[in-house]
Image (cartoon, rainbow, N blue to C red):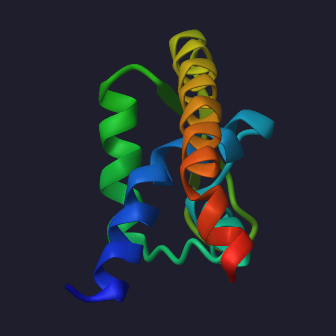
């Protein structure tokens, strides 16, 4: 088993939480979301993000508005719906529980390093 494959799967697993968290701060344009994810070392390409945004929108967690751009065609900006906000709170709670469990489970490994 290759470590890089496992790392990629772990990142994909938390991508939805991170995307919703970014959008919860303020409405977001996809390239801005990608920049924030790259800055956090959650490398994402447009081919990964757009299907996720579409799925979240179809699940009524996101909505979008079109805004005029000074440099080209109108842009689609995403924001959370009320359902999306509730869903995000549930994800954060689950993440906190998982993070605690993983930290407890790996405590001995960390002290050996």
Residue 15 visible in this rendered orientation of the protein:
yes
Give left or right: position of 60 versus 27: left
Residue at 56% x, 39% y is: 101
User: Considering only vertical position in the picture, is 98 above or below 7?
Assistant: above
User: Considering only vertical position in the picture, is 46 above or below 83?
Assistant: below
Q: Position of residue 49 (x, y in %)?
A: 42, 61
Residue 77 visible in this rendered orientation of the protein:
no
Tell me the quadrant of the picture where the C terminus can be found. Answer: bottom right
Number of numbered labels in the structure image: 0
Tell me the quadrant of the picture where the N terminus can be found. Answer: bottom left
User: Considering only vertical position in the picture, is 97 above or below 55?
Assistant: above
Residue 79 versus residue 103: which sits nearer the camera? 103
User: Considering only vertical position in the picture, is 94 above or below 19?
Assistant: above
Residue at 29% x, 81% y is: 5
Residue 79 versus residue 39: which sits nearer the camera? 39
Q: Residue furthest right?
A: 25
Q: Position of residue 11 (x, y in %)?
A: 45, 64
Q: Position of residue 103 (x, y in %)?
A: 64, 50
Q: Residue furthest left?
A: 1
In which image quadrant can residue 51 be found? bottom left
Residue at 48% x, 54% y is: 15
Give left or right: position of 42 versus 113: left
Q: Position of residue 105 (x, y in %)?
A: 54, 49
In which image quadrant can residue 65 be found? top right
Residue 79 versus residue 41: which sits nearer the camera? 41
């Amino acid at each position: 088993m290759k470590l890089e494959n496992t790392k990629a799967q772990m990142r994909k697993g938390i991508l939805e939480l991170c995307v919703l968290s970014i959008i919860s701060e303020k409405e977001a344009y996809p390239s801005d979301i990608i920049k924030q994810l790259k800055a956090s070392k959650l490398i994402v390409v447009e081919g990964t993000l757009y299907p996720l945004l579409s799925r979240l929108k179809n699940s009524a967690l996101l909505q979008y508005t079109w805004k005029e751009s000074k440099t080209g065609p109108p842009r689609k900006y995403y924001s959370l719906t009320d359902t999306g906000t509730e869903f995000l709170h549930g994800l954060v709670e689950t993440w906190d529980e998982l993070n605690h469990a993983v930290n407890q489970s790996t405590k001995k490994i960390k002290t050996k390093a």
